[in-house]
Image (spheres, rainbow, N blue to C red):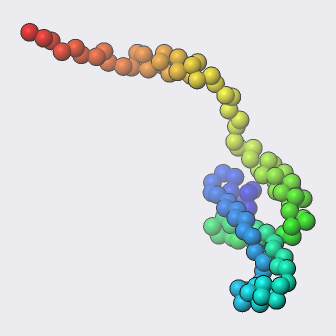
Amino acid sequence: MYEHSTEKGSVWVTLKRSSMKSKLKRDKMVSAGEAIEYRCLVRATDGKKTISTSISAKDQQRFQASYATVLKAHMHALKKRERKDKKKAAEVNNKHEGGLKKPRSTKATS
């Protein structure tokens, strides 16, 4: 999905906690005192195609590391900007805008 949307488009990724059971089954498990195992439901879509998977709690860190690697590999179009000091940035803006500003008119008092 990231390769298809490099030039144009977006990819939406959502993560959601899920027990993968219906509300009725969860309520029965809670009333019986059983522990509910929650998983992480991951969905990705580019508007046309959707993929999804569920991840157990123990595999979550490995998935996060793999997903970060995929993101870094496909974010080559974004450039890292250098941080500028606020004073220097203000001075640069003043220099560029200096020739473009009109002088202020003053009120004539009689």
Please state the horizontal and vertical placement of residue 30, each as a whole percent of the image: 78, 84
* Vertical position of residue 24 compared to residue 69: above or below: below
Give 15 or 8, whichever is nearer the viewer: 15
Name the one closer to the observer, 54 or 7: 54
| Total marks in image | 0
Residue at 86%, 62% (x, y): give it.
60
Seen from the viewer's position, the closer of residues 75 and 27 is 27
Residue ID at (70%, 64%): 14
Identity of the residue furthest to the left in this view: 110
Can the viewer see residue 34 in this picture? Answer: yes
Residue 46 percent across, percent down from the top left: 66, 64
* Left or right, residue 42 beside residue 104: right
Left or right for 42, reference 105: right
State which quadrant residue 79 falls in.
top right
Q: Quadrant of the C terminus?
A: top left
When the figure is inspected, residue 29 is found, relative to residue 49, above or below; the finding is below
Q: In which quarter of the image is residue 88?
A: top right
* Residue 52 appears in the rendering: no
In this rendering, is residue 74 above or below 60?
above
Q: Quadrant of the N terminus?
A: bottom right
Locate residue 53, reporting x and y percent.
80, 72
Could you say where residue 25 lies in the image, as x and y percent from the top left? 76, 89
Q: In terms of image quadrants, where is residue 51?
A: bottom right
Instruction: Identify which residue is drawn at 75% across, 44% down.
Output: 76
